[in-house]
Image: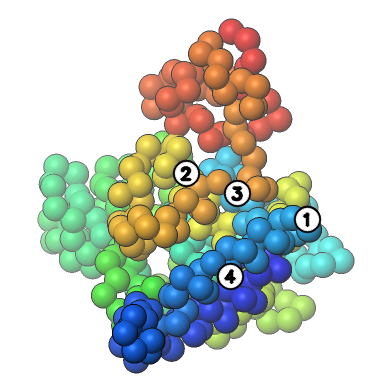
Amino acid sequence: MEFSSTAREKAIRSAISFYYRQLQYGPWEIDPETGRAKGNPALSSEVKDYMAGLRRHKVQVGDISASVRSISAADMKKIHTYLTTDNSTRLQPTETRHPLGDAISAELYLAFLVAFLCLLRSEEVLAIQSSNIRVQVCRKGEREFRYIGDAVREATSEGQTLTFSEDEFRLEIMLVTRKTHQEGGIKPYYLWMDRSDPHLCAVTAYFRWLSFLGPEHNGHLFVGIKENSQQLKSSQMTRGMFIAMFKNVLKDIGLEWSFYGTHSFRRGGTQYLLNERRWSLQLICEWGGWSLDYDNMTIVRYLHGLYDITPVPRDQMMNKSFRYSHKCHACGRDCPCGPQYSLRGSTPYSKYR
């Protein structure tokens, strides 16, 4: 999603390109002898030059294209605290929303977290079915994961029980379709228990939502709520409801909600994996389902945008003695190479050391 007056032109070009791809048309070519053209016209150099010229013109007249602001891991921690604690603020209705009860809060945070960690679009998250997620367990002392049903039966036969403190849990998420994989062939996502950052633990968030939804639930994992009530529907949560609730949560925790959109999770997750988890671009492309063809450099647009908060002040970028006030949770260092690079706050850095 972009704040851009060229969005309509981009959508038209994409629709034309998709139509010709369905017809198996290749690159746009013009025969120099006959002058006849063949291929996908949306891929022609003339159309590319026109789109580039249109963007330059918009910038010159002050109409700047900018992506929505990304959600950071620190933002996710604020949202987690707000949605998982007995907070009187969210339990009170406002002019723009109904009270956010424990069930709705659990549902929202799981949806936010899956979008953030798996780099998913909002419609892809909302399309997840209960059958698309399965819990896997690796019992203490073992090295292989097995589905929770098999693990429970084996533990019961041995007179033992599974525990979060002793055994390792993870989620296996299988998507049916994605925007870039309309015919399937999507690799599964595996989200492990995160004991170092509980606010990023999808396993805990899943079991919390499941306690309200019920283990026997079938159909869409994320369901809507009945108007003027806290009762859950059996139908899928709509994208409009998802966006409205997301922005209301941002308002409640004090973030400038107008800069954010549902793509903020996909952008924020990408930056989290690069800056905090130290993943390579190749690994991020593999995880997020991006093409490894770096000609279009689609992923670059996710790494920084006009409205993103830069963690280092420009006048300190070349300062070798620059140090952060936050320390790495893994090694305890505050040097620029650590994952604390993307942490935000009113004073996320120390100018002098």
Q: Secondary structure at mark 1?
A: loop
Residue 211 falls left or right of residue 72 = left
**Eyeballing the image, is 289 above or below 183?**
above
Mark 4 vs mark 3: in front: 4
Q: CA distance from mark 3 to mark 2?
A: 14 Å
Q: Can you identify the residue that label 1 sits on?
A: 62
Residue type for callout 2:
Tyr
**Residue at the farthest right position:** 95
Front residue of 88 and 124 = 124
Residue 157 falls left or right of residue 203 = left
Q: CA distance from mark 4 to mark 2?
A: 34 Å
**Eyeballing the image, is 22 above or below 65?**
below
Q: Can you identify the residue that label 3 sits on?
A: 305
Q: Which mark is residue 302?
A: none
Mark 1 vs mark 4: in front: 4
Residue type for callout 3:
Gly
Q: Can you identify the residue that label 4 sits on?
A: 50
**Eyeballing the image, is 216 above or below 65?**
below
Q: Can you identify the residue that label 2 sits on?
A: 272
Front residue of 181 and 38 = 38
Q: Secondary structure at mark 3?
A: loop
Residue 323 falls left or right of residue 165 = right
Front residue of 154 and 198 = 198
